[in-house]
Amino acid sequence: MKENIFTYLKLFNIISGLKEPYIAGKLLLEKQKKLAVAESCTGGLVSSLMTDVSGSSAYIQSNFVTYANEAKAKYLNVKPETLEQYGAVSVQTAGEMVKGLLENTGCDYALATTGIAGPTGGSGEKPVGLVYIGVGTKDEMHVHKYNVNPKLPRIIIKYLFAKEAIKLLIDVLKEEAI
């Protein structure tokens, strides 16, 4: 019982303090740019958080949940060879997800997540709590590796992944403002 209370309190603290979707939205509005999102391990959570902001339809173009490898290939043009050689959870797959979003949607910015939220599915090489986050434009791409404590509950891991993804988007948006 105590673990459940702890889990919900921690989750509440993460969600209630989440300012990143508002910051990202403001930057996208100021730049008059559109965003497309493709998610695997976050299962639509990044998209949900970004659309929690009133007026987000002005900058959200397309959102995809491409959980299965077949969906990554079909909707994001991730090469089957990439998935076979590197796996769905890899810097290469995250990069191809971003590239596919940019090509298929015509958006200005693309954001993608692929990782292992657990509690199962991890390995020594790719543990639970690992995510690759890609953010890109037609001119540049950033793919970051991020790890969280694998002992956290799945829902908290997913929120931490989503928060980190939006933070990376903000960094890229601010970088381009310079």
Image (cartoon, grey):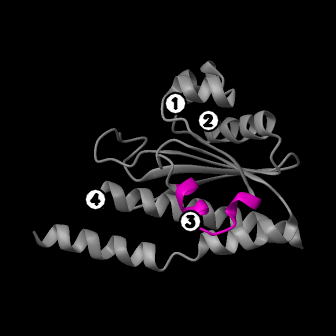
Query: Label 4 is placed on what type of residue?
Result: Lys
- Against 80, residue 122 (above or below) is below
Task: Read off the residue under disc 1.
Answer: 87
Task: Read off the residue under disc 2.
Answer: 93
Q: Residue at x 29, y 59 (%)?
A: 153
Magenta range: 46-58
- Magenta-colored segment: predominant secondary structure: helix
- Against 96, residue 70 (above or below) is above
In terms of sequence position, does the residue under pointer 2 or pointer 1 come before the other? 1
Image quadrant holding the C terminus, namely bottom right
Distance between the alpha carbons at the discs numbered 4 and 2: 25 Å
Q: Secondary structure at mark 4?
A: loop
Label 3 neighbour load within 10 Å: few <14, some 14-19, many 20+: few
Q: Are marks 2 and 1 in contact (CB under 8 Å)?
A: yes
In terms of sequence position, does the residue under pointer 4 or pointer 2 come before the other? 2
Residue 137 pos. (x, y %):
82, 50
